[in-house]
Image (cartoon, rainbow, N blue to C red):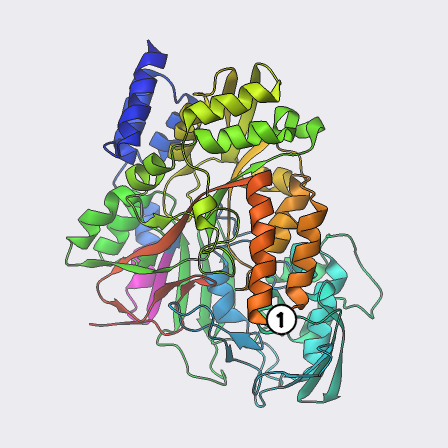
Amino acid sequence: MAEAKSNGLVETLTQADLSRRSFMKRTTAAGVVGGAAAIGLAGAASAAPASGVARRASLSQADAKTLVVLDDLPGQSWLYMDPAVIYEINPTASFYLLYETLYHLPDANDLTRFEPLLADGMPEVSADGLTATIKLRQGVKFHNSGTEAKAADWIWSWGRLSTLQGNPSFLYNDYIASVEAVDDYTLKLTLVAPNAALVPILSAIPLSVTDSAVLQQHGGVAANGTPVVSGGALDPVTAWFNEGNSAGTGPMRLVEWDTANQVTLEAFPDYWGTKMAFDSVVFKNVKDTNTQLQLIQTGEADIAFAVDPDQAESIKADPNMQILEAPSLAFEYLALQNDPTVGGPLSNKSVRQAIAHAIDYEGINTGLNGGATVRPATAVPLGMLGADEIKDMAYQTDIAKANELYQSSGVGEQELTLTWGAGTVAPSGLARDTLAPKLQEDIQKIDGLKVKLNPEDNATRLAQYRNGELQFVMSDWSPDFPDVHTYAEPFGHSGTGAAKRVKYNNPEVDNLVDQGIAEQDPEKRKQLYTDAQKLMVEDVAFIVEFQPVYRSPASAKLQGATPHGIYILNLRNASKTE
């Protein structure tokens, strides 16, 4: 009986007649959601904000010079406030206020127009493409010491990033062979190879400058020091940062880091550039989306990162609220383990292709996401080189084809374990506790294939995924820097990023990606990445379900804040009207 009911639900959703909330209610009644439904419904069970949360928000919001931003801080992986360690998504919004890179992307609607930030002009690149000389902005002061940021600080900061060998260390180690100071305000970079993406790479938050003298006082070690740790472990400075300290040059400085409650930033009075309109920015921990909206409606908060698609129309009709929109370069995806010892049947390409044909993309994107999405063919979002050229190669829902491929694989009856971060949301605002049972129903239309749902604590899930321990994973991706290479390499090149986590290996893709980063001719470069993406579609180590338009619910009084494809939220120009 439950199976019959659930089959009817999928058919209705395919016709885009079933909303996310209706799907949850009806699958729960049908008995097919199990633990996932309980998790999802528990998070939205009460529309009334918890009194403690509301009281803390009121105290912050009473000051009109305070900006209150709502997020599920533990659920969205606010793990570290260390720029040499940060590799999560939502915390980037705070790092863009605390730390500064040589170049940045201030316009959320033009994610290709880079501007100097702490650089004084664009790089001067040698004829052979192997060296780049960059002038530095003068008069830039650090948060703690008030000393001026100079070339030696950049060299030390990048050396520490390299030495820690954590997730973001590749931004230096893979692309920069060495860096030296021509003088106090000039850097000379020697590159590993000619690099067409140099400026985008230099805009990545982990390549920010930090106060080298202060960090050394707290145990920080750079490349030429005596290593305290290696192999991805953390040095003592990471703990110092997480005690509520910062050592950057941005318009805000960190004064409180308590992810169970809030992360607080205060204005840096000696900031070199245009000061923000606020004395403080508070990122407050509020998990439930209904509670988030109530706090914004009542003026106790100003903005949240994402909106539940079911709530979008009611927000638009509320004169006290608005939805801010901007293009994203993020996407939601499924990772399919290629290693047979972990992935089992997923190591068979025909099984992976079958799953890609079984998913009801229309039901997910029109029915669950409310249509505020697009779908690239592979793990390179639309807008990046080659993605638009191959978008018609994206897998389409075809259950007959899915069954044909699965039967040809010869793997027989199998069960997959689908893991995701319980209580987390996708970049579109869609709850993964809702998406998971939908995917389960879709994939189980393949005869002989079952899916076991495995919601986990997100920090646990993330650690296991990064260690390559999971068979079948729901996750999302936001770029380290806005260039095709930041997708094609981690998802296509063996031994790197997400490809390493699922043991994906195609030497042809490796070769094309290696050529692509060095190619200076735009048209030739586009062709190389296009060819690489075609192979990635065929191999289907990853299935991209959607690339959302970022939508953030906000108070109607908030001006100048924008969702952003790189910084997730750009709050630098935000202000509030009376």
Q: Is residue 49 visible?
A: no
Q: Amino acid at mark 1?
A: Ala
Relative to 553, 118 lies left or right: right
Vertical position of residue 159 compared to residue 542: above or below:
below
Magenta span contains residue 60: yes
- Which residue is under mark 1? 196
Closest to the observer: 43 or 215?
43
**Residue at (56, 50) in percent of width and height:** 533
Horizontally, residue 394 falls left or right of residue 207, namely: left
Q: 165 and 287: which one is in front?
A: 165
User: Which segment is the magenta one?
Assistant: 57-69
Rendered residue at 46%/26% (across/down): 401
Q: Any magenta on residue 82?
A: no
Quarter of the image with the C terminus is bottom left
Taking the spot 31% from the left edge, 52% from the top edge, the residue there is 55
Q: Residue at x 70, y 43 (%)?
A: 505
Instruction: Tell me, yes or no, if residue 120 can be seen here.
Output: yes
Q: Position of residue 156 (x, y in %)?
A: 73, 74
**For residue 461, what is the image quadrant?**
top right
x and y percentages locating residue 71 in the rendered image: 40, 51
Q: Is residue 457 above or below residue 139?
A: above
- Whether 167 is drawn above or below 244: the answer is above
Indicate the position of residue 326 as horizontal and vertical percent values: 35, 61
